[in-house]
Amino acid sequence: MILKSSVKPLIEDAVDVDKASSNIPVRQNMVTPKAVCTALILIPLNAYWVIKMEAIRYSGHPTTISLFFNVVFILASLILINGIIKRTVPKFAYSPGEMLTVYIMLALSSAIAGHDMIEVLTPMLSHATYFARPENGWASDILPYLPKWLIVSDTQALREFYTGTGSLYSSNNFHAWLTPVLCWSGFLTLLGFVMLCLNTLLRRQWTESEKLSYPLVLLPVEMVNPKTQLFKTKLFWGGVALAAVLEIWNGMAYLYPSLPMLPLKFAGSGQDLSSSLTSRPWNAIGWTPVAIYPFGIALGMLLPTDLLFSAWFFAWVWRLERVFGAASGYGDVPGFPYVEEQSFGAYIGLAIFALWISRNHFVKIWEGMRDRSINLNDSHEPLPYRVAVLGVAAGSLAIFFFCKMAGMSPFMIISFFLIYFTLAIAITRMRAELGPPAHDLHHSGPDSILTSIQRSDHISHNDLAMFSLFNGFNRAYRSHPMPVQLEGFKMAERVNAKYRPLFFAMLLAIGFGAISAFWADLDQSYRLGAAGKIAPPNVQLIFGTEPWDRMHGWLKTPTSPQQQFNVKGAILVGFAITMLLNSLRIRIGWFPFHPVGYAVSGSWSMNLLWLPLLIAWIIKSVLLRYGGLKAYRDALPFFLGVILGECVIGSLWMLIGILFNIPTYAFWP
């Protein structure tokens, strides 16, 4: 059986959870030169792999789900190599903390490189200049308002970037990209620094006082735990074997079509429920893929039952709202039923609720800031609280001046980043408390919201230009770095390690990871051509075009007063429903609806995961009802094995495809 001390924090029904306490001194140093050097060697290789999968081959997409399978694979490989080292030269073996340091730094660098960060940002920096035409109006309406130091304007460098006729390493091309890459890498590192300071202020309250469960840290922590019984459990290896068989079979069937493909994932219109509903109003149900995803089922087993129920339940509520709209005539209202706007309101509600219940903690910190004689008991924290508060203030000022230099107005700078960091806190809270497998919030960041609740032609061109550039880290929030940071601190707690060195290791991973991701994207784009040999649908062109078409739309067709009213109403509805659900959950023990389920259920990823989470809810409910906590604990290693098996075999298929330059099966998405 898996160690109970590792499993209990993940079971919402357990009375005795997570024995970690702030009274236990943190002594071990998990951030050693060996661990950091290993991570720094692997970060560029990992960035190249992530960009190759997601942007070039458009297959796999590890950073679109909360647990990055590429990093789990690297950790499994490191554990295997470490086993060999222990047998041959034991003094060079990695400790559990060192392996977790590598894992955390790689996870953060993957988040920065991922599908909602630099993969979006890189093509944006070149697209507006290269594709400006008289007919699209970009040359007159957009280019004059873009800061030259944040985009690429050199004609030759852009032509070779899109056609693949040059090299990144030629003097002209290298220098054309150098300033924008360094500026954006520094800015993303600055954002990461502010997030780390915020996490420093939140860590003790959420981890030790509220004892949030951090479900997504269980697998990596157990993998490196020298005392774990996980690898001795037959059920675990049964899960690994099942996942491996399924992955190998479908991988071979993908290469050899004579073999039947097991219908585990969404693979076409035949598995889209909406394709069989052709009459009104049911044809308004929208895209509803029917997919199994063993990986998704196994991840779901780590979640509380009320979140599992709420995620699939509200996913169907959104669909029924569309059906209702079609039947009643509201379907003709542009944007109805305003899923993104309601979700945005829900995220804001989650953040405010989380901060409100932590208010006593923040009051103590504020009192300590005013009276230095008060002992804040923060000697073991990632930073002293006073330094963390000053870090948030200094980082915010630096962000302000960066944006001011780029031409933004003070009011819009403050509004934009107040919304941005509020969303970041909401995502971090839901990951720490519940570990949802995805949290997209597509096109619902501050850039989209601010231009929806007021007329965009009343916002300056410079502000709209920066809103568009900021789409590079606000298009969606699936690979957001802030929850990864807090999960890193939780892993440090689990191995009784120092937080402070990890703070700076994570900051290093963000900065170096950003530069590595830019390099990986640019290197491969120059080799193939960003408009050339990129797998359909060619996200380099999609991500590059999207923000500038949107900005042109803001200028030419601003949101109408009626649409502004509808958007504001939808945001308020989302906020109100979230606060109501939170209040009812506190007062009614059996209340089945979780506000996080409502918030995340309208996303792209939940379209794919509604059925796996429904299956996980049924399995977990049956286990808890008829076998109790013991049955669930006994079964959990099997599902951890499924996760690990799919991560390992799925990653191997990705590597085989890259090595032999052939398309291969991807288990997600």
Image: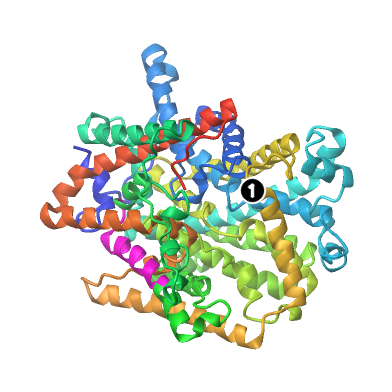
Give amino acid for label 1: Glu
Residue found farthest to the top: 88
Magenta region, residue range: 302-319
Q: What's the residue at 52%, 70% (across, down)?
A: 340
The residue that mark 1 highlights is 119
Image: 282 above or below 661: below
Residue 212 seen anywhere in this rendered image of the structure? no
Image: 3 above or below 13: above
User: In x, y percent, where is residue 419?
Assistant: 58, 69
* Chief secondary structure of the magenta portion: helix
User: In x, y percent, where is residue 506?
Assistant: 54, 44
Q: What's the residue at 78%, 51% (across, down)?
A: 126
Q: What's the residue at 63%, 77% (across, down)?
A: 452
Closer to the camera in the image, 229 or 22? 229
User: In x, y percent, where is residue 528?
Assistant: 72, 36
Q: What's the residue at 78%, 44% (across, down)?
A: 162
